[in-house]
Image: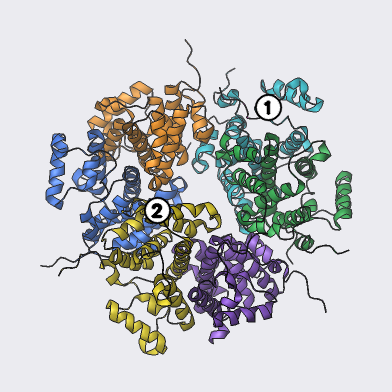
Chain colours: A yellow, B blue, C orange, D purple, E green, F cyan
Amino acid sequence: MTAAVRYPVPELKDLPEDIRAKVLEVQEKAGFVPNVFLAFARRPAEWRAFFAYHDALMAPETVGRESGLTKGDREMIVTATSAANNCLYCVVAHGAILRIYEKKPLVADQVAVNWRKADITPRQHAMLEFAMKVCLHSDEIAEEDFAPLHAQGFDDEDIWDIAAITAFFGLSNRMASFAGMQPNPEFYLMGRVPRQK
Amino acid sequence: MTAAVRYPVPELKDLPEDIRAKVLEVQEKAGFVPNVFLAFARRPAEWRAFFAYHDALMAPETVGRESGLTKGDREMIVTATSAANNCLYCVVAHGAILRIYEKKPLVADQVAVNWRKADITPRQHAMLEFAMKVCLHSDEIAEEDFAPLHAQGFDDEDIWDIAAITAFFGLSNRMASFAGMQPNPEFYLMGRVPRQK
Amino acid sequence: MTAAVRYPVPELKDLPEDIRAKVLEVQEKAGFVPNVFLAFARRPAEWRAFFAYHDALMAPETVGRESGLTKGDREMIVTATSAANNCLYCVVAHGAILRIYEKKPLVADQVAVNWRKADITPRQHAMLEFAMKVCLHSDEIAEEDFAPLHAQGFDDEDIWDIAAITAFFGLSNRMASFAGMQPNPEFYLMGRVPRQK
Amino acid sequence: MTAAVRYPVPELKDLPEDIRAKVLEVQEKAGFVPNVFLAFARRPAEWRAFFAYHDALMAPETVGRESGLTKGDREMIVTATSAANNCLYCVVAHGAILRIYEKKPLVADQVAVNWRKADITPRQHAMLEFAMKVCLHSDEIAEEDFAPLHAQGFDDEDIWDIAAITAFFGLSNRMASFAGMQPNPEFYLMGRVPRQK
Amino acid sequence: MTAAVRYPVPELKDLPEDIRAKVLEVQEKAGFVPNVFLAFARRPAEWRAFFAYHDALMAPETVGRESGLTKGDREMIVTATSAANNCLYCVVAHGAILRIYEKKPLVADQVAVNWRKADITPRQHAMLEFAMKVCLHSDEIAEEDFAPLHAQGFDDEDIWDIAAITAFFGLSNRMASFAGMQPNPEFYLMGRVPRQK
Amino acid sequence: MTAAVRYPVPELKDLPEDIRAKVLEVQEKAGFVPNVFLAFARRPAEWRAFFAYHDALMAPETVGRESGLTKGDREMIVTATSAANNCLYCVVAHGAILRIYEKKPLVADQVAVNWRKADITPRQHAMLEFAMKVCLHSDEIAEEDFAPLHAQGFDDEDIWDIAAITAFFGLSNRMASFAGMQPNPEFYLMGRVPRQK
């Protein structure tokens, strides 16, 4: 079995109180602790900044902000970005969440392999096209790249969201790949099988 | 729902007898007809050549040949190649078969996202490294590329297999992407959930 | 002298009857046996599939199909594809055939070095532009790529031909480069000197 | 004059108290407010996470951590990363700080144009080589990439620092380029002229 | 201190008379001898051809030709080209001259890091876009690339100037990088500080 | 028929005396005027610098210099460089001269399509490997790139020759491609057919 990460992982009991509380909360909700929560915990200050940034972008309601992007949109950007960066942890973990939010068991694999052929809306297609330019050619972004997004109903704040999510997960992808972070096995199957009553 | 393919798909009843027989055989075995079988059937001569080539490489026993590659090795090469070419159909369809042959529910996603981080053997790692060079830089293949494979126990015929599978699915990937071929929904879940008795 | 290919080449007398017959037929017609015919013959099943596929695309009349591409068009696609893949065997061998079919002694070198500057028709220019996208970025092919071809009089079946020829020779290029296949010396000069009576 | 950033910039008086305090502190210290402090302030939660992350990596002593990287090392990584991403704001702003920390008026331009030709130590050369791999090919990082750094005296925590700084400024670069953030004119000259008494 | 160049540098007294005269003239004018003048002088015939070519393009008035490009335009092309080729010597040396001719202390760093974000005119933007295509994809230049330049008032001779300057400094960049040529320290600061009376 | 070049070509009678003399000399020797001689002649100062540079590198004996490269070596570098830059004029024209100097009718096509598979010596292989790095990644050239050339008997001056020829023809390639310069038909066949007595 491949280790969860190349670097030492602290034990739950050794974590600062605020971090342990968050980890336990996630565990409660998800049924397991996603490896990223422990892989980064060796360095509490980075951990806190990482998850504060994550939440500000991925759960804007927690900071009192509304966004024109749905939860599914956001996870779709993360999945496409992580695929472009070939980040195993993030494609598998966020692909799982994407399936759940979009209620589409097939969409994550489609977006990860070739978003151009995915069964998504034209609005999401424009969103991913812009995200990919931020991901791969940010120096070439120009005013004319905003027009197709405006045409799909995104305003400038939504576009900032698209760019910021792409940029933030570019950071996350590099750290996860560098550190050899492995996705928890649970993620691979989440959202693939429709829930039965 | 996205169509299975951009081009017209013939009806089963209109197919030449040999092709219809093969399609029915696959349907019997898999429980459904993989889209590639119908997407190519509009052109019977290409269909026959494509599947004859496929079988010669992927089922060498059907042509009386033994191979040093296992069935899982072969599907692993297909999955890595198809991911390098961003081919949705082939990653999803052959990833499914890879999971089944390797009896590893997680391996296909790992190989598709970043084969370097996949839970595979050093022998398979060397195999994929060579396959990726054939896929992406075949003009640079030189004698020194054979040594790491020999060191892992592959002989020259096995190496031909690796190259030929990579090259053949490069063809398949380009046709599937060009024609907008969609994987059957069944593939996405195959091999992910351990069979219960 | 560089060997014809890195792998062992069977003797004509050891070939299966159908393959030997085809090899002799080609020799009769061309005056020599192109190396590809022997380089692949070690593996009869692959040989048969390869040439069946080749003929289905390059000689569609042999399978009772008409194509909107001329023989010259087809060889032009092969030459451009093989140049993009830096495949020595295929550029030299198919460049020779291109010169003959197009009756233009200069066109093969032009297409191989920079097809954009070749002395070809606007229709052929559009054809090669599409072929190069299939060759290099097949995952990005979209519906809008078909329009310039329709505008030049190609229908969807012709476009399938362009894509399939490109994809098939991508396979051929990878095998020839991987195996170090050398073009027969005869090819280099064929079609360069106008026939005298 | 090019605007400081494409997006609206809040006035100092409208900022949350903690952000305003930090901005004033920076202004006091630097003599001007670097544009990034105001360009991100429209979104306080992102602002706080961004600068908390920044400080955890670039001023580890503020979070009670020691690092094997000097301040100059860190700014050198930022400058090289930002140059690889063609980020105008970060190359100019962090190049200025690099000149000051390293007390080398020429080093920033050298690192930005071609770090391989810069007048830096072999240890810094190894550091930048790893940083560039994290920046451009993070999916290919493998265990063997750690050895040259260990050989130069970096331990695994230092290597985490190199990777994290590279990854964080990859985020910063993408946001600054996307948002058209312009460096303050003051940065261009800082550290170029030796201070006179 | 890094050496000025990897190859031996002749002494002034050993140079042929015409070369020594030119070197002394440059020294008189600039206050120092730019390293390129000595680094190339080991080979007088190449030296003479290099500077004759340089002057024909960069100082057309010396050969009795007028150009639609200003001196600043020309140095801007050199700076952008040299940045695209990551040539330390040329970015630093010609960036200095660019600052002086354009009377803009910030413009050279902007053009070197990301010309798309530089504070330049739309005419200069079109000029650099064409120069970058000549620099990076000259084989793809087509008639339609001339139209945006004509629209900005450049005629065909001006466009030849843009291409020729780009091509010539591509040569210069390769030689300077190959030979490890270092810019004189004086260049780094030139044109950054407004002259006082 | 494609025009020789996109720009106006002066008539022989309108050329400056020295240029006309050289053109007539070449015509006398070759039996035709290579298009480059007229395509550049519109600008005499550039013409003179271009051919002075050319001769200093390609005919060093004319400037009293000896070189460790044979005439065939030099044309081989030009052919490989021009192929890497997809320059139709230079591949065809210099490939012709390469065939003649090396007395190998096949070598030019081999070097142009894939120099790694060409029938050349190990010394020439090392020479082209270095030339390709100068051509494509000059910023990455480092001291360790010189060792394989020293091992093949090249000294530092020979290596300067390799780099300079590569750099000079990078200039030539960009100008020829930009200006749409077409090779004279005569070049295509030169050196392909052994001379008969």
Q: Main secondary structure of the magenta part?
A: loop
Residue F132 among those drawn in magenta: no
**Closer to the observer: label 1 or label 2?**
1
- Taking depth in this image into account, of B112 and E105 the one nearest to the observer is E105
Which corner quadrant holds the C terminus of chain B?
bottom left
Chain of the residue under label 1: F
**Residue located beneath label 1 in the image:** F8
Query: Of the residues shown, which amino acid type is indicated by label 1?
Result: Pro
Q: Position of residue A21 (x, y in %)?
A: 36, 86
Q: Position of residue C135 (x, y in %)?
A: 41, 42
Looking at the rendering, the stretch of residues picked out in magenta corresponds to F1-10
- Residue F154 seen anywhere in this rendered image of the structure: no
Q: Position of residue A143 (x, y in %)?
A: 54, 54
- Inter-mark Cα distance, 1 to 2: 48 Å
Query: Of the residues shown, which amino acid type is indicated by label 2?
Result: Met
Is the residue marked by circle 1 packed among few (<14), some (14-19), or many (20+) residues within 10 Å? few
Chain of the residue under label 2: B
A190 up-or-down from E114: above or below = below
Res. F58 image quadrant? top right
Question: Considering the numbered disc 1 on the image, is that residue within a helix, a strand or a loop?
Answer: loop
Number of disc labels:
2
Mark linked to residue B132: 2
Q: Position of residue F124 (x, y in %)?
A: 58, 43
